[in-house]
Amino acid sequence: MPEGDSVYRLRRRLEAATLGAAVRDGEVRSGNAAGRSLAGLRIEGYDTHGKHLLTRFDDGSTLHTHLRMQGSWTITRPGRALPRAVRETARVRMRLDDEREVWGLDLPVVEFVPTARESDAIGYLGPDPLREDWDAAEAARRLSMRPDRPFVAALLDQAAVAGLGNLWVNELAFLRGIHPFAPIGTTDLDALVALAARCLRISATVPGMYQVTTGDRRKGSSHWVAGRAGRPCLRCGTRVRVRDEVQNDPEQRRTWWCPQCQLMPGTTDVGTPA
């Protein structure tokens, strides 16, 4: 699933390619504005908050989209067409004045809101480390409100900290040396929030460091635990464990951890109660 750093990087690509461009023709094909023509609008700006993308137009309206698991954006050069099967998944289409086309593909969330009322769509989100209004103290405060909540569930809650997805939550648990299902209140929240912000910013802005948590960009070595089930921990050699996600339960995503480096509080060694 795309995370806050993914959407931030997408925003930067769209900005570089289309900021200020006029829309010759196009339309919205789903959501609360399905059938709305985009012809005559100019792309005035982009913004992100967590995993949400905001496309602002010069008529005072904002297109709010979310990729979730399957969505994407692409731009085709003049004279180039997407395959028919791909075009059929388009939820947003914009042909620009220079004949390039911008496509929002298979987007599960598509809605128009007045730019002045963007908070109607995203106001519930917590602080985002990639925004200028990032508030670390507020993020820590929100996480502290339910100290008994499991670490991974607390950090996946976008109302606490916006932009952290499953990969970063699992990697942060390892980096903090905490079991992913230990209570969030058992770790130093200020230190955790600072680490999360630093990691997300490096991933979003430093070339070659996108979602690299170990500092090693080689395939199979870029993550400490995420995606490494059954493989030796890169720190201690213990086999990494995994717990499969629970269907329809947003607090039980697939979770990886090292049972030696991330002991559950109240245990003295791997899986042995104290």
Image: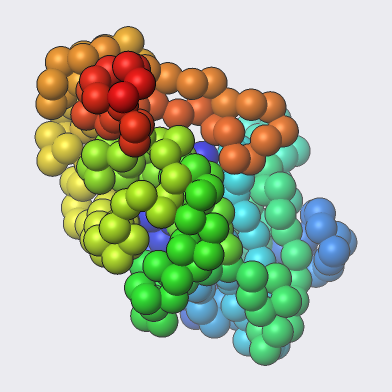
> In the rendered image, is residue 49 in sight?
no
Q: Is residue 156 above or below residue 272?
A: below
The reply to whether residue 209 is visible in this rendering is yes
Residue 169 in the image: above or below residue 233: below
Q: x, y (%) of residue 90?
A: 70, 46
Q: Is residue 60 left or right of residue 168?
A: right
* Residue 8 location, quadrant: bottom left
Q: Nearer the viewer, residue 63 or 95?
A: 63
Name the residue rendered at 19%, 46% in the picture: 208
Residue 146 on image: x %, y %: 54, 58
> Quarter of the image containing the C terminus?
top left
Please report the residue visible at 66 percent of the width from the left and 84 percent of the height from the top: 115
Taking 87 as reference, is 9 left or right?
Answer: left
Horizontal arrangement in the rendering, residue 203 relative to residue 167 (left or right):
left
In this picture the colour scheme is rainbow
| Residue 222 figure quarter | top left
Residue appearing at x 24%, y 25% in the figure: 268
In the depicted structure, whether residue 273 falls above or below residue 85: above
Indicate the position of residue 14 as horizontal and vertical percent values: 46, 63
The percent position of residue 109, horizontal first and vertical second, equals 71, 54
Q: Between residues 252 and 213, which one lies in front from this camera angle?
A: 252
- Picture mark count: 0
